[in-house]
Image (tube, helix red, strand yellow):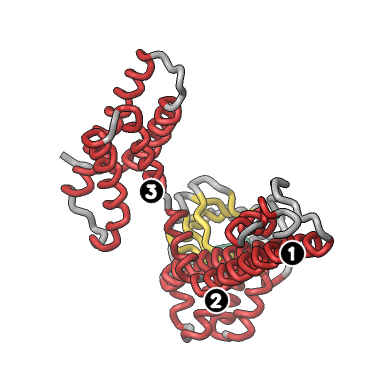
Amino acid sequence: MSTRPFQRISAPLGTSLAIVGLIAVAALTTPDLPERTRHNLEILLVGIWAAYLLQLAETLIVPRSVDFRDRIPSVTVDVLAVAVPFAAFLFVGRRDQSLYCAVWLLKPLRYSTFFRLLGRVVRNEARNLIGVTSIFGIVLFGAALAAYVIERDAQPERFGSIPQAMWWAVVTLSTTGYGDEIPQSLAGRVLAGLVMMSGIGIFALWAGILATGFYEEVRRQDFVRNWQLVAAVPLFQRLGSAALVEIVRSLRARVVPAGTVICRKGDVGDQMFFIVEGHVSVATPEPVDLGAGSFFGEMALITGEPRSATVSAVTEVSLLSLYAVDFQVLTSSNPDIADAIRKTAIERRGAVPKE
Ligand code: CMP
């Protein structure tokens, strides 16, 4: 029997069960819950656990094309989702048993590609993140030390030691400001202002590093995917690797469903398209079918005139689009490609009846 349907619903089912399970765990902590409801919620948790046991069996038994080393994180999550509640059932009292089901919080992470992306970003930016975290630690300790020295005599119960002053430093540096510990002296308040401003700077640095890391990682993924797509377009196969890198950076990949109008006759054209996969139909008096490796939308870029025909997707089409500015750069630095595109445009223009 094929396991594909099970594999397809495995991720949404695993996440939905985790959400239901965690709501049940939260509900079970309500003190005046009727015994019957408590019992039903516990049965629900056992049911979810059984489903996760099946999922674990499927993960371990069914062969996968992915290398086992790459599967270690997801297999670990599956094992923990079953083993931790089971161990709690054996060794922990009834009151706290359900709390251990909170390990299911990890389940959504197991399926999410976002968390894998986040993992890569953190790994790539580890050096910078550690740098900023060190600054955070230094400022934190320095602020606690200074606050201790300045405020210890005026407020010994709040700033009587560095560890005590550390709480004030964390609350101030993170600009949370609970207000439970407030410096009384002028010097203490000046210090508080400086710590708050440093906090804003440090958090901005963290955010900036992560944002840049995400941007670069997404760009890198796009680059790898576009590289494979560009390799499928015959026109680009004559390019040298430096020019290829340039074109891969300028092309935007896009998939359009069957029936979509990609460009409409009479519209202003600001980009041309290369077909990687699928078919489009050009609505000339004698409709023309273009398939993988062909391009269209070049005429408007060359002549500056409106689109000469409407082009629609016959099947789902994988496209690479090239904007006018990048088109100019590509054609000026690659005369071969410019000639090939111009020649095709002239032939097509001959086929389009003049109005
Ligand atoms: P453009 O005029 O920018 O937008 C419509 C596109 O349809 C056009 O560029 C060509 O790429 C394409 N096209 C127009 N006429 C023909 C044709 N006779 N054969 C193939 N493609 C065409």
**Which mark lies nearer to you, 2 or 1?**
1
Q: Quadrant of the C terminus?
A: bottom right
Image quadrant of ligand 1 equals bottom right
Dot 1 alpha-carbon crowd within 10 angstroms: few under 14, some 14 to 19, many 20 or more: many
Q: Is residue 285 above or below residue 88?
A: below
Residue contact between numbered discs 3 and 1, judged by CB atoms under 8 Å:
no
Secondary-structure class at tag 1: helix
Q: Residue 343, percent across and down?
A: 57, 77
As rendered, which of 22 and 92 lies closer to the eye? 92
Which residue: 34% across, 36% down? 101
Q: Is residue 156 visible?
A: yes
Upstream in the sequence, badge 3 or badge 1? 3
Which residue: 29% across, 61% down? 70
Q: Residue tagged by mark 3?
A: 111
Upstream in the sequence, badge 2 or badge 1? 1
Name the kind of residue labelled 3 in the image.
Tyr
Name the kind of residue labelled 2 in the image.
Ile
Q: Is residue 270 visible?
A: no
Q: Quadrant of the N terminus?
A: top left
Q: Is residue 166 above or below residue 49?
A: below
Name the kind of residue labelled 1 in the image.
Ile
> Quick check: 295 left or right of 12?
right
Upstream in the sequence, badge 3 or badge 2? 3
Q: Which mark is residue 150?
A: 1
Q: Residue tagged by mark 2?
A: 247
**Which mark lies nearer to you, 3 or 2?**
3
As rendered, which of 332 and 345 lies closer to the eye? 332
Cα–Cα span, label 3 and label 1: 51 Å
Which residue: 25% across, 33% down? 89
The answer to which quarter of the image holds residue 340 is bottom right
Q: Residue 239, percent across and down?
A: 48, 83
